[in-house]
Image: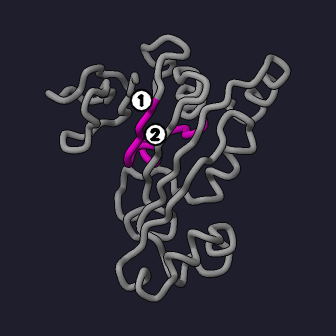
Amino acid sequence: MKILDIGCGPHSKKEGSIGLDKRPAPHVDVVHDLNNYPYPFPDDTFDWVDMSHIIEHVDRPLHLMNEVHRISKPGATVRIITPHYTSQLSYGDLEHFHHLGYITFSTLQNTGLFVIRRHKLHFTDVYKVLGISLLANWFPRRWEKYLGFIFPAFYIEVWLEVLKPDAGHNALVDKYMY
């Protein structure tokens, strides 16, 4: 299995993965500005792409996702972890340019390029004990709409499957990704 870790951290890089980051470091295999496309990989290269705490830092998340789609094999898994938009962690970092939630990835799914295979909203222990975590993960859209800012989450984690549509869907790529 060929794995790409975009924005790989020194303690979070997946074993056996190729680490892509904009800053050189011992754990980084490929140094590349994450806002500069295309990335230095051929089409349909990776079976798994991991992005932990990176999508909120790039200038244009849709361009990043379009590039991830290009370099991923059909059926590849893309795992994304990002602070949920209701979290103080989302707004507490001056380099967070985007604030994302479940609805963000639902909208991305509507492009036809990805499908959500799994999602998890992460909460404090208090909200787990009160059952809010369970409720929010069962009904994420309703929780975001009605209760998100009352009972904020820390993070959202999603697992997307890469779909490689036929030529008839290329207009959809252009419509949503550029």
Residue drawn at x 38%, y 27% is 3
| Tag 1 and tag 2, C-beta contact below 8 Å | yes
Residue drawn at x 14%, y 27% is 26
Q: Give neighbour class at mark 2: few <14, some 14-19, many 20+ (Cα, 10 Å).
A: some
* Magenta-drawn segment: 48-62
Q: Which residue is mark 2?
A: 58
| The residue positioned farthest toward the left in the image shown | 26
Residue drawn at x 75%, y 27% is 174
Instruction: Reply yes or no: does residue 53 show up in magenta.
Output: yes
> Type of residue at label 2?
Val
Label 1 or label 2, whichever comes before in sequence order: 1
> Type of residue at label 1?
Leu
In front of the other: 40 or 77: 77
Q: Is residue 123 left or right of residue 25?
A: right
Q: Which residue is mark 1?
A: 34
Residue 143 lies, in percent from the top left, at 63, 75
